[in-house]
Image: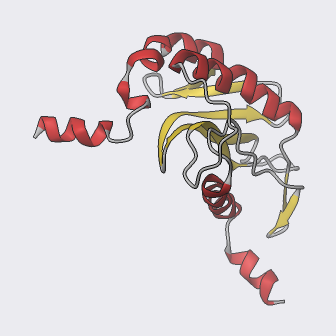
Amino acid sequence: MKNQQFLTFVSPSLVVILLAIVLAFTQKSNLTVVSIASASQNVSNTEYLEMTKKGEDLIKKQILTPVKIRMGITANGKAFSRCPSGIAHYVMEFPTVKESKHKYFQGKVVNYVGCSDIEICSFRMDKDETILEIYEDSKKQYIPAETWLTIHNEDLKNNPKYKDPNYQENQENIAN
């Protein structure tokens, strides 16, 4: 009974974020995919969908592999480290079985450099796992992954903000 009461007060997003943190520090280095989807869950009488291999493959094909190629990352993921390095993704929100405000799998793609993570982009995928979009800050909306990759092609190759975990801090120090 106490566990049920506890789960009533814990949001599904918080559980997912905590799982992502645990997985980030326990997985093999140079991870390419962090999958934290589990069987459909019933938390606070809301049933959430599970991401399938179809969705994982779509994310890998449309975001992870193109980003790794553009950034020149050739990690193979065979070495073990407490602090993994490489491109990974995690899902923060899952769609609900019934139509509601949660219609998408929503997550982030990050570049882990040692124990630091650098956000590459935020994405969403429809519950049928057929449409994948990336949030474009300049347009303040989601756009097709291919369009986002075209817009950011040179940035992914050359901009240190995607590779250096101290980039933002260094820029602030230069400005001051």
Q: How is the image coloured?
A: secondary structure
Task: Tell me the residue at 56%/17% (across/down).
Answer: 148
Residue 165 place in picture, x, y as percent: 38, 41
Considering every residue shown, the one lying at the far left of the view is: 176
Task: Tell me the residue at 20%/40% (across/down).
Answer: 172
- Asked if 90 appears above or below 146 in the picture, the reply is below
Q: 26 or 155, which lies in front?
A: 26
Q: Quadrant of residue 66?
A: top right
Q: Is residue 63 left or right of residue 55?
A: left
Q: Quadrant of the N terminus?
A: bottom right
- Asked if 149 appears above or below 113 in the picture, the reply is above
Residue 35 place in picture, x, y as percent: 75, 46
- Asked if 148 appears above or below 37 in the picture, the reply is above
Residue 132 place in picture, x, y as percent: 72, 26
Q: 113 or 8, which lies in front?
A: 113
Considering every residue shown, the one lying at the far bottom of the view is: 1
Total labels: the figure holds 0
Q: 150 or 138, which lies in front?
A: 150
Task: Tell me the residue at 73%/33% (across/down).
Answer: 125
- Asked if 46 appears above or below 155 in the picture, the reply is below
Considering every residue shown, the one lying at the far front of the view is: 79
Q: Quadrant of the C terminus?
A: top left
Residue 58 place in picture, x, y as percent: 78, 26
Task: Tell me the residue at 48%/16% (across/down).
Answer: 152
